[in-house]
Amino acid sequence: MCLSMGFQTANAIVRALRNLYPKVTYLKIPKKLQHLLPEWNLLEIPLKRPRSSAQRFVTRGNTPVELLIQRPGDNQSIYQTFASSKYIVLDVYGHSDSEYISSIWSRKYSVRNIDSISIKLPEKVIYINNMTDRMRFAVSTAADWQTLGLGPKQYWSCISNLDKEDMSGAGGDMLCVEDYRVWRTFDNLKVKEPSCIS
């Protein structure tokens, strides 16, 4: 999959990133592009926005993509924000520094924990526990045998630099794409379907 975007989309994404990473010390923009990318002056004081934000766009192949930005100081789970906005069940894999890892369960949406994944090689299968890995991803449920939220079937896959249980107030982001092939790849990593009781 290839991603290209227009200047308006690039400016919108960078506007959001200014709130997330306000300490950029050097940025080089070619002179011919500076007038097309006014938001790219990351050396200015970051814009003030009261809450986290999401940027939505589509690829040339009409694949929906969302970039969720969590500002420093916002303690709400970025995974819960995304799941509740789509009314989906979101399974999250990743190490957490929290002592207690919880699941969120409601009739409308849920956020569950993936305890381990498996990588299938021709000669063997490798099992990886989420407490020994620093990778983070999330995948919605959409198969016939999986529990669904109130929303329609949606094939979302997400990567993030935030823990599911992050309460430090650190800024971060999550990039999500709705594409069946990407979703199937991430969904097949799960060893078993998570339960809502953790």
Image (spheres, rainbow, N blue to C red):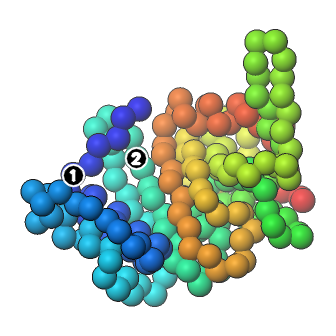
132 horizontally vs 32: left or right = right
Mark linked to residue 155? none
At 44% from the left and 55% from the top, the residue drawn is 66
In this picture, is 12 found above or below 117? below
State left or right for residue 97 relative to residue 148. right
Quarter of the picture holding the N terminus = top left
Residue type at tag 1: Gly
Identify the residue under disc 1.
6
Query: Residue visible at 89% across and 70% down?
Result: 99
Residue 39 appears in which quarter of the rendering? bottom left
Q: In which quarter of the image is the C terminus?
A: bottom right
Above or below residue 146? Residue 51 is below
Q: Where is residue 17 in the image (x, y as percent from the top left)?
A: 41, 69
Crowding around mark 2 (Cα neighbors within 10 Å: few <14, some 14 to 19, many 20+) is some
Which SS class for mark 1?
A: loop
Which numbered disc flags the more N-terminal residue, 1 or 2? Answer: 1
Foreground pick, 61 / 117: 117
Q: Mark 2 points at which residue?
A: 64
Q: Distance between the residues labelled 1 and 2?
A: 15 Å
Q: Which of 85 and 61 is in front in this view?
A: 61
Q: Does dot 2 land on a helix, a strand or a loop?
A: strand
Q: Residue at x 39, y 40 (%)?
A: 63
At which x and y percent is residue 89? Answer: 67, 53
Q: Residues within 10 Å of mark 1 (few under 14, many from 20)?
A: few
Residue 34 in which image quadrant: bottom left
